[in-house]
Amino acid sequence: MASIWAMETSIRRRKPLAGDLKTEVAVVGAGMAGILIAYRLQKAGRQVVVLEAGRIGGGQTRNTTAKITSQHGMFCQKLIQNLGRERARQYAAANEAAIRAYRELIDSRGIDCDLEAKCAYLYGVDREALQREAEAAASLGLPAVYLEQVPLPVPGAGAVRFAGQAQFAPLRFLAALAEKLTVYEQTRVLRAEGQTLVTDRGQVQAEQIVFACHYPFINFPGLYFARMHQERSYVLALENVPKLDGMFIGASSDACSLRTCGDLLLMGGESHRTGEDRQGGRYAALRQRAKEWFPGCREVACWSAQDCITADGAPYIGRYAASRPDWFVATGFHKWGMTSSMAAAMVLEDLMCGRESPYAAAFDPGRVTLGLLPGVAEESVQAARGLAKTFFQPPKERTILPGHGGETAVRGEKAGVYREDDGKALAVSLRCPHLGCQLTWNPDENSWDCPCHGSRFDKEGHLLSGPAQKDLRKR
Ligand code: FES
């Protein structure tokens, strides 16, 4: 299930690392964040290499809806409460600066990536809540106004409108930007030892290291697993639809995201914590809503995305940990990877070149904020649950029908089994190789997903996405 971006763009292949090398800066991850960080640092005169386990843009960048916006849902009131007003203002300013930086970069390099100016709308039926959100956003310096009506088929909905936002084709932008960078594809970083990255193709020694690989897989120091989880959401590309003028996101947790893309409409939603989709039916629910809102629409593509959610809602961008002053991180972009990637590149360029960043405090991975503690407590409860299932729930034999997956017992031990249509069983260990939580079956995507920190594996147990670094054991 490839996204429309993956279908329309082919990015030039790069060779894997061949042996050891030394560099000033090594960036782990060649998604939007990694490439932007590398690009800005190289432009600032640094010698940079990028190490990528798969392909450039092959992770979550190809699954985005590619809105370049500081409109991050029903978020500003929560942001002020969680971070405090000063940091919330920095967060808002960084995102507005990120939009300008995209425009300048695309204009100055003449990148053909369908950049279009758009307004962003937060829509919903609770008008008082929307009015409060518009006031909170405006108080942070964001270009927000409350509107009584929104141009969408949602009865009784009002909106908060942000002016001066944008949308684009992300992989075309990424391909152009990566062209002059040194990127090693198919090169997986296995571990970091001081200033050395050990990969499956050789070792890279770097004065500074940036982890921009979606979810930082080094557990200690940093403890990112204790203060972040992942969520999945689903997208349909529809044709034969009305042309909507703007980008839209619903205010309630079950609402949809919408944006046009040429003659198509991208409709996203059905978000859930990774590992919590036992019943499935996410695509079906989205298709049903598409039919109700846009009768006569036809689906041309569908895909899913995965996002890192931090304990207080703001990304972690800055020094990886106090004990590693030359390691840096960019993660936890919530569902707003485009502006957050550019904000990360701006903040890290300043910090890594020894300059002050006007936005660093808002994103500081070592921050202690009011919103952090409840989030960390919730992550601990989830991890305890996942571990308890692994260690204290005895194996139970169950029948797994063809075309289905689930937990059962194999030779007296707990296992995950997917049964092919011809009856053949694929059995894997249900113990996540990251920190040991019990995996669950995702019937929408035929994958084994971890509810603790969001690692995913295909039906045969091959690693799809981390923080886990290894495949599942076969049973
Ligand atoms: Fe951490 Fe599975 S992703 S235990």
Image (spheres, rainbow, N blue to C red):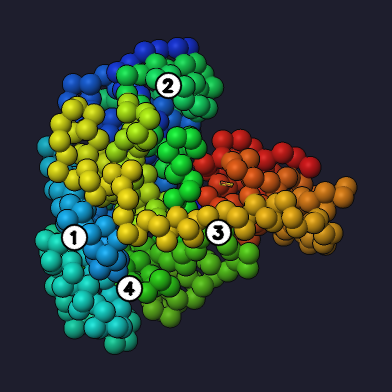
The residue carrying mark 2 is 194
- Residue 383: x %, y % from top left: 57, 53
Element class at badge 3:
helix
2 or 3: tag closer to the N-terminus: 2
Element class at badge 4:
loop
Q: Is residue 264 above or below residue 424?
A: below
Q: Residues within 10 Å of mark 4 (few under 14, many from 20)?
A: many
Look at discs 3 and 4 and give the one toward the viewer.
3
Q: Residues within 10 Å of mark 3 (few under 14, many from 20)?
A: few
Disc 2 under 8 Å from ligand 1? The reply is no
Identify the residue at image location x=17%, y=56%: 86
Measure the C-alpha gap from mark 2 to mark 4: 44 Å
The residue carrying mark 4 is 251
Marking on residue 381: 3
- 160 on left or right of 321: left
3 or 4: tag closer to the N-terminus: 4
Nearest the camera: 266 or 447?
447
**What's the amino acid at mark 4?**
Ala
Identify the residue at image location x=59%, y=41%: 434
The residue carrying mark 1 is 85
Is mark 1 in CB contact (under 8 Å) with mark 2?
no
Measure the C-alpha gap from mark 2 to mark 3: 32 Å
Q: Residues within 10 Å of mark 1 (few under 14, many from 20)?
A: some
**What's the amino acid at mark 1?**
Arg
Q: Quadrant of the C terminus?
A: top right
The residue most toward the bottom is 156
Marking on residue 150: none
Nearest the camera: 81 or 170?
81
Q: Residues within 10 Å of mark 2 (few under 14, many from 20)?
A: some
Measure the C-alpha gap from mark 1 to mark 2: 36 Å
**What's the amino acid at mark 2?**
Gly
